[in-house]
Image (cartoon, rainbow, N blue to C red):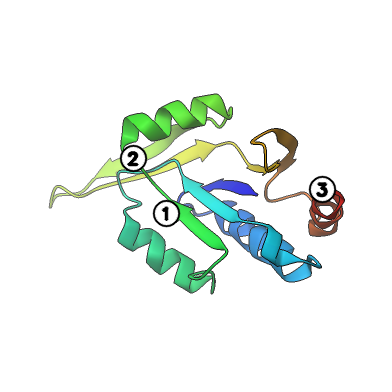
Amino acid sequence: MVGFIYTHCPDICSFITANVGKVYEEINNPGNTQFALVTFDPERDTPEVLKDYARAFEMDREPFHFLTAEPDVIEEFMQRVSVRSQESYSREFEDGERMYFLNHSDKILLIDQNSRLIFDYGGSMTPVSMIVEDLEKL
């Protein structure tokens, strides 16, 4: 299962993350499933930031993986899985710090052991029970 997030999101990313955690809690055999959350904001979502974010959701353990990469790798991957994001608001402060928000796709993917896309869900709005049912069919 793969979800797409950024840690500074003021909106749906926390729901996507929570839904991934709920699926883990509700499936009958969680040992057969890996759960990845990939950031599309690698500039701010460093491994340490992702580690803290995972800890906040009590997902800083197996089988959860919070992933980032170089910006060009992330951009190419997001294009391949049809996750879109664009800056919606930004502001630069007097101290030079820059704050920004992203509009983005709301997506969780279910991928089988042969790397085939099985289901594409609305990440924050699909009922967890539906995802669990589909996952248990694999």
In the displayed structure, would residue 47 be above or below residue 118?
below
Within 10 Å of the Cα at label 3, are there few (<14), some (14-19), or many (20+) other Cα atoms?
Answer: few
Of labels 2 and 3, the one closer to you: 3
Label located before the other in sequence (1 or 2): 1
Neighbour class for label 2 at 10 Å: few (<14), some, many (≥20)? few
Q: Secondary structure at mark 1?
A: loop
Residue at (78% x, 49% y) in the render? 126
| Res 128 label | none
Q: Residues within 10 Å of mark 1 (few under 14, many from 20)?
A: some
Rendering coords of residue 58 (x, y %)? 54, 74
Q: Residue at x 68, y 51 (%)?
A: 124
Q: Which residue is mark 2?
A: 90
- For mark 3, what is the residue? 138
Q: Earlier in the sequence, mark 3 or mark 1?
A: 1
- Vertically, is 130 above or below 74? below
Whole-number angstrom distance, CA of label 3 to CA of label 1: 33 Å
Q: Are marks 3 and 1 in contact (CB under 8 Å)?
A: no
Image coordinates of residue 115 in percent, x first then y, are: 64, 36
Q: Which residue is mark 1?
A: 8
- Left or right: 110 in relation to 74: right
Label 1 close to label 2 by CB (< 8 Å): no
- The local secondary structure at tag 3 comes to loop
Q: Amino acid at mark 1?
A: His
Query: What is the C-alpha distance between the residues marked 2 and 3?
Result: 42 Å
- Alpha carbon distance from label 1 to label 2: 13 Å
Say which residue appears at 50% left-offset and 57% top-offset: 65
Depth check: give the residue in front, 91 or 7. 7
Reading the chain from its start, which is encountered first: label 2 or label 3?
Answer: 2
